[in-house]
Amino acid sequence: MSVTAEISVEDFNPLKPEFFANPYPYYKLLRQHRALYVEALDSWWVGRLEDVRTMSNDVVNFSHAKFQEFGLGEFDFAPNVDQLVATDPPVHTRLRKLANQGFTPKRLKLLDGDIQERIAKLIDGAKSLPGRRFDFMHDFADLLPVSVVADLIGADPQRCPDYRYWTRSIMSASNRKTMTPEQHAEIRKSVADARAYFGSLIAHYKQNPAENIICDFITAQDNDDRLSDEEILALVILLMIGGDETTGHLMGNLLTQLTMNPDQYEILRADPSRIGDAIDESLRHWAPVQTAFMWTTNTVQIGDVSIPPDSTVVAVWGSANHDPDHYANPEKFDITRKKQGHMSFGSGPHFCVGNMLARQEATKAFRMFLEEMPHLRVEAPEDIEWFPSFWMRGPKSLPVVY
Ligand code: HEM
């Protein structure tokens, strides 16, 4: 039996709450083995940075095609079209080329004012709560990203609670095998409601062009090629899902890391222009998205491990980011670290399309917090209730004082 500290290969079960709370000792073991078969998830996990990077870029041997079938099954929100996250080149290349016509610096720049305004309103709301304390997730980080994506796509901001409900309900389909028929009916309804609302929004903007990303998708063109209405619908729902909890977790993680490392918080307070470095270090140290799923098309070899074709393989960004062959003292949160990049937005053709938007939101939010609440801190960082997931890392709630 192979052992790292007190953890053995038999203990490597990503469904356990101990794993959600702190996966990093498990990742140390994973990197020793390079690849491990995890029975609980019938999948092969890969943890060294070079291996994770290689598999993400090797689209011949590692496919994304089963992504929605595996994650959502019968609850896929757009089963009749190719979807960005669930295709390989050249189909993915086509979709990404058209989708990128929405994620332009101009589109993001136009969002600047809206983001600033939303942050200011949320901070005012937090200040109005008694006792100079609030819940950073519940009162801020869970609310900002969904409203920013609503602004991005031109959706009614009043209906953000609906968007959140639908996308979270759809995402819960990853646990569909252990759910009741009533829960299945709930997800089915969320899929239908999300499709109906965003479908009518697309129809509206086809008749009434405006400044938003849906209109960019409607007019996007590559020679004679354009996105169909159903492809736009799939993209819009994907943005709602991809741009919500991920960015919220980044902000919750960063505040926790700063609270737990007062010397680093002090460096940032003294020089707020370091916020970009702090965000990147937060992403490296605690990746909000810890894993990506892929499927082997052939037998592949990772170190001594031979993985058969049609196996589920998990690229563990969170482990790659702590690879000591790449980062000195990887467990330390250090915003002055020499820039070496990280894997938290993925790698290869599926590299996160929303990475600039996530940075934009977090940068503006923390700039304003540093000005308005410079002593904002998590009340009990050691007792955080973590989001119950092996693939998402972030606090479920985060009581703070300022
Ligand atoms: C801190 C915040 C975020 C993190 C950590 C994150 C992480 C990731 C990662 C790791 C991937 C690659 C997945 C893979 O290889 O299978 C990805 C892809 C993606 N992300 Fe993000 N993301 C964030 C924010 C956003 C935002 C704000 C949006 C949109 C509004 C977004 C939309 C997407 C989409 C659509 C893809 C799929 C791209 C493709 O398949 O070509 N993400 N993200």
Image: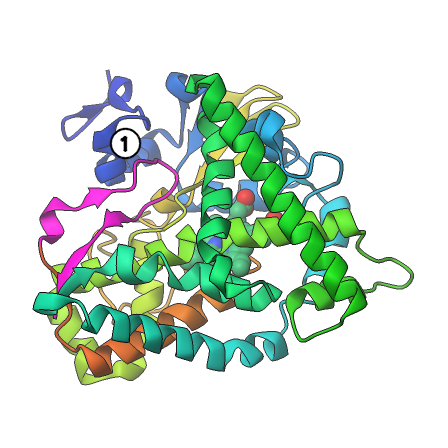
Q: At 42% from the left edge and 18% from the top edge, which residue is drawn? A: 178
* Magenta span includes 277: no
User: Horizontal and vertical percent for residue 180?
Assistant: 44, 18
Q: For residue 258, which quarter of the picture? A: bottom left
Label 1 element class: helix
Q: Kindly give the residue lying farthest to the front in the view shown.
A: 158
Question: What x and y, as percent, mark residue 171?
Answer: 48, 38
Indicate the quadrant containing the N terminus: top left, top right, bottom left or bottom right: top left
Counting other residues with Cα less than 10 Å from the Cα at mark 1, is it few (<14), some (14-19), or many (20 or more)?
many
Magenta-highlighted residues: 380-402
Quadrant in the picture for residue 85: top right
Mark yes or no: residue 391 visible. Answer: yes
Above or below: residue 277 compared with residue 97: below
Color theme of the render: rainbow
Q: Is residue 345 among what the camera can see?
A: no
Residue appearing at x 47%, y 37% in the figure: 169
Which residue is denoted by mark 1 in the rendering?
29
Q: Name the image quarter holding residue 47.
A: top left
Q: Is mark 1 within 8 Å of ligand 1?
A: no
**Horizontal and vertical percent position of residue 370:** 22, 79
